[in-house]
Amino acid sequence: MMTEEKENIDEDIKKTEEAIKKIKESKNGEKDSGDYNIKVIITFIIAIIIIGAIFYFKDNFQNNNTTIEPIPLDSNIISTKGVHLHPNIKIIIKGEEVIIPENTGITPQAHQPMHTHDTTGTIHTEIAGKVLKKDVTLDRFFKIWGKTFSEKCIFENCNGSQGTLRMTVNGVENTEFNNYSVKNGDQIEIIFE
């Protein structure tokens, strides 16, 4: 009987050992599978961080260079990255100041690139992308306003017996008149007397 019990015990031990071995194998398999999943997730996170860093530094590098712009070969180009200018225009006809209306160039349907917000004479010039000299001329603003301005006339007042048109920019005589390309902070006076 002893031998039979011993054989049963040996068989039970063998079965237990096999069960333990199977449990260990399944645990190892799960661990390997779990390790694999963790490795995939970590690799994915690292890839996202690297890609994000590339885009961040690329955009940051480009944004830091927006103030340093190469001189364009075409002298008609004043910017390749847009402009935001605020010249001021004062119009005096026969001794009386003409007020440029507020919201000139602004309607519910359109917001022109050259416009006013108030009656101070400040012309907000906001243009994105490539900007040519012709895009920021006084001619463009007066066309948006719907008024006449040239080297000979302001509104219906033209050189001749009525008087003479002249213009100053920052206190200096300027003969470009409607062809003048405005610059930020310009103080422009258009005088007919």
Image (tube, rainbow, N blue to C red):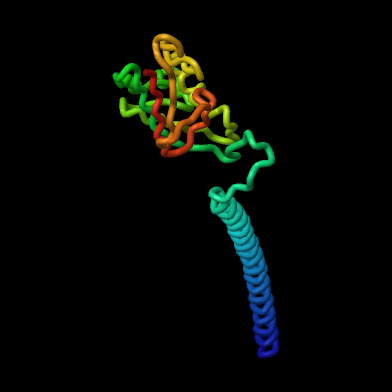
Q: Is residue 86 visible?
A: no
User: Is 46 drawn above or below residue 72 in the view shown?
Assistant: below
Q: Residue at x 70, y 89 (%)?
A: 3
Taking depth in this image into account, of 127 and 142 the one nearest to the observer is 142
Left or right of 151 on screen, residue 99:
left
Residue 33 position (above or below residue 1): above
- Give the residue at x 69% y 41%: 73
The residue lying furthest to the front in this view is 161
Residue 114 vs residue 8, the one in the foreground: 114
Q: Position of residue 84 (x, y in %)?
A: 47, 37
Residue 114, image x and y in percent?
46, 27
Asked where in the image residue 43 lies, by quadrant, the reply is bottom right
14 to the left or right of 142 = right
Taking 181 as reference, is 36 above or below it? Answer: below
Q: Which quarter of the figure has residue 13?
A: bottom right
Question: Residue 144: where, in percent of width, then height?
Answer: 47, 18
Residue 80 in view here = yes
Looking at the rendered image, the quarter that the C terminus falls into is top left
Q: Please name the residue shown 64% across and 76% down the image.
A: 20
- Horizontal and vertical percent position of residue 110: 45, 20
Quarter of the rendering containing residue 17: bottom right
The residue sitting at the left extreme is 96
